Amino acid sequence: MTTATTRPLGLRENLGPFLQQLLQVFFVGLTIGLQRTVIPAMAETEFGVAQGSIVSLFAFVVSFGLVKGAMNFVSGRLSDSVGRRKVLIWGWLVALPIPFVILLAPSWGWIVAANVLLGVNQGFCWSMTVTAKFDIARPDQRGLATGVNEFAGYGGVAIAGLATGYLASQFDPRTALFTFGLIVNLLALVAAILAFAETRPQTSGTAKGPAVSAKSIFALVTWKSRDFQALSQAGSVEKFVDALMWALVPVYLAAQGVALVTIGWITATYGLVWGASQLWTGPLSDRIGRKPPIVAGFAICASAVAAFPLLSAPLAWAGAAAVTGVGMALLYPNLIAAVGDLAAPEWRGSALGVYRFWRDLGYAFGALAIGLVADASGYLEAGFWLTSGAMALSGLWLLLGLRETHRPEKG
């Protein structure tokens, strides 16, 4: 029988592993962020995407979402059996070819293929940083742990988007992306091998009953539990916003004549505000509960996304991006924390994997829906209306169908 480690729970008590987890999720954010500004804006000129075909452009987001969603489920189950550290290292090994594909890609199909690898990397690596933090955090620190984790990750996304925008404007864009991506991947792999601490033993000895099957956990998180179901649909729909900001916003701004560096600043504003705000929105849910900030976040995102195409100046677009970032910060870490509240320690990795499966399929669902609507209507603005409406309806579902998962102790 596997015995649990004697290390106490708590972020302060596990500061070393916690800092290593933050470093890893920062690298993960940098890896996905290098595609956020340059690649969508150059899809037609550099990679041969047919002019005006939003569905074709969004194919690289669809491939990413489908693969990442599936790998979230796989990695969650694997991490409960082989440990968090091994899955993390496997994820970085898969990422190594991505910079070379971007450098050599003769067509957009290669970028779509690169995002299959990126989906595996993200599904394995980002998932492990979340699960490992829940292994070492106390129940009253889950919001804080998730908020800090997502701050580091999406801070990395924003920094990479801004940095690659500048590098691509000064040097050959492909060479800039290749160099940036390869350095990040190698540093992350070395850090994972040399310093990332295994956290699974902290919970592996706590199971009291028979093993829970993957099938039963999938059913529970997907439809059998009213609360898990509400959280899973919400996770999927909120990715509509990120798909919009990732692929449609750079194209929309480029069509308005905005320079690449300015586009980088606008999209980075969204990521930086989202990332930094999670430093207070995660702890907020530890104090007041998960549901109020989640529902408020959906309402704010719906409003800010709807306002975006009504604006006409870079400063105004940056303001809308910042408000969207605040909304995402309110909902994003607290959806994850709520899943952690409901899941038992011995199958928490699997439950988080199922939730993240549905959440990141939202990239594919959202990108495909936004692309189809934009192509069918002939207006890029239609993608903003669709995303806003979906967020409003999903927030209403949460308001009516989700019970509070965390009730803070009154002192």
Image: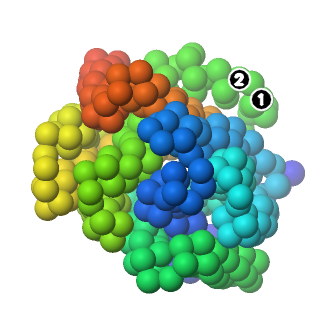
Residue at x 13% of width, y 56% of height: 313
Colouring scheme applied when the structure was drawn: rainbow
Q: Are marks 2 and 1 in contact (CB under 8 Å)?
A: yes
Q: Is residue 154 left or right of residue 132?
A: left
Q: Is residue 170 above or below residue 144?
A: below
Q: Is residue 203 left or right of residue 300?
A: right
Query: As rendered, which of 39 and 154 lies closer to the eye?
Result: 39
Q: Is residue 411 left or right of residue 408?
A: left
Q: Is residue 176 above or below residue 220?
A: below
Residue 91 spot, x, y in % from top left: 73, 61
Which residue is labeled 2 in the image?
216
Residue 21 spot, x, y in % from top left: 57, 70
Amino acid, disc 1: Ser
Which residue is labeled 1 in the image?
213
Residue at x 65% of width, y 21% of height: 219
Residue 308 spot, x, y in % from top left: 20, 43
Camera sees residue 15 = no
User: How many residues crowd mark 1 within 10 Å: few (<14), some (14–19), many (20+)?
Assistant: few
Residue 355 spot, x, y in % from top left: 56, 36
Amino acid, disc 2: Ser
Query: As rendered, which of 9 and 192 lies closer to the eye?
Result: 192
Instruction: Tell me how far mark 2 sits from mark 1, CA to CA.
Output: 5 Å
Residue at x 64% of width, y 37% of height: 66
